[in-house]
Image (cartoon, rainbow, N blue to C red):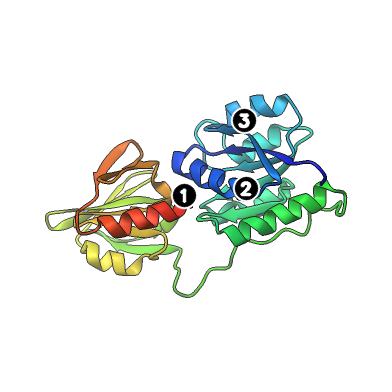
Amino acid sequence: MDRKIRCIIVDDEPLARKVLVKLTEQIDQLEVVAVCANAVDAFCHLQKGNIDLVFLDIKMPKINGLELLESLNPAPLVVFTTAYREFAIKAFELDAIDYLLKPISMGRFMKTIAKANKFLSGQSTSKTEQHPPEPKTVDEPEQLYIKTQRKVIKLDLSHITYLESLNDKVILHTSNNEITTSQRIGHLADKLPKERFVRIHRSFMIAVDKVSAFNSIMVEINGKELPIGRNYRSHVLDLLQKELD
């Protein structure tokens, strides 16, 4: 395209919005018109028209990204940005041009922009050449088996927000409930993907993509502040900062 690609970012997590803003800032051709924390605000911007591309999260309160896209007619080009692999088929059925799994690498992001540019410049008239979500690797499990007092539970990793070690038990806080196990936090840490989960304190381990805010002494997840231990601080802050760079 001869002009800049006008885009908006829609994500309910502040850290995720910051990451996407950082990615777009590195590509001169992109112009971010609005950054929205929910689908309703995004819908209002889209009704004004003149938006070429939407970076859209899926799991958001009240109206999710899939519902927002279904409500748009006509719709701009949409790229879903999410931590949830299972919505990919539905996203492509709704004619999204791409599906980016968090954490999003710069290289993968550039491929998406190249595809959007090709479509907007008229070099392509089909949205069927989607890049599929990155395949699972052998050392990146999607489920974790948790031993509770009465049974073994298979837990989807994408549902875990953080782990809390308390006396002789560990509480797994999820997007839906809490699960208590006698398994040690160190044992569970060995089974979780290192790029998605990080120990921040002797008593806490977090899902990196669930962090909504942080500073040098704490992270915030679902409105709860969790302390960063002194011995973990350097590694944790380096990891979270990479999400912004």
Residue 130 occupies which quadrant of the picture? bottom right
- Real-space CA distance between mark 2 and mark 3, rounded to the nearest whole angstrom: 14 Å
Residue 180 location in percent, x, y?
24, 53
Which amino acid, by three-letter code, is at mark 3?
Ala
Pointer 3 residue: 42
Please name the amino acid that badge 2 sits on.
Phe
Q: Earlier in the sequence, mark 2 or mark 3?
A: 3
Q: Is 10 on the left-hand or right-hand side of 7?
A: left
Local packing at callout 3 (Cα closer than 10 Å; few below 14, some 14-19, many 20+) is: many
What is the residue that sits farthest to the front in this orientation?
28
User: Which residue has dot 1 on it?
Assistant: 244
Q: Secondary structure at mark 1?
A: helix
Q: Secondary structure at mark 3?
A: helix
Total residue callouts: 3
Q: Are marks 2 and 1 in contact (CB under 8 Å)?
A: no
Question: In x, y percent, where is residue 154?
Answer: 38, 61
- Determine crowd level at label 1: few under 14, some 14-19, many 20+ residues with C-alpha closer than 10 A: some
Which one is closest to the eye, mark 2 or mark 1? Answer: 1
Distance of label 1 from label 3 (alpha carbons): 22 Å
Q: Pick whichever, 223 or 70, lies toward us.
A: 223
Q: Say if 201 sits above or below 35 in the image.
A: below
- Seen at 67% across and 47% down, the residue is 28
Residue at 31 percent across and 60 percent down: it is 235
Image side of residue 237 versus residue 118, left or right: left
Of the two numbered discs 1 and 3 on the same chain, state the one appearing first in sequence.
3
From the viewer's perspective, tell me whether residue 193 is left or right of residue 75.
left
Residue sticking out furthest to the left: 167
Spatial separation of the CA atoms under disc 2 and disc 1: 19 Å
Neighbours of disc 2 within 10 Å: few (<14), some (14-19), many (20+)? many
To which residue does mark 2 refer?
Answer: 80
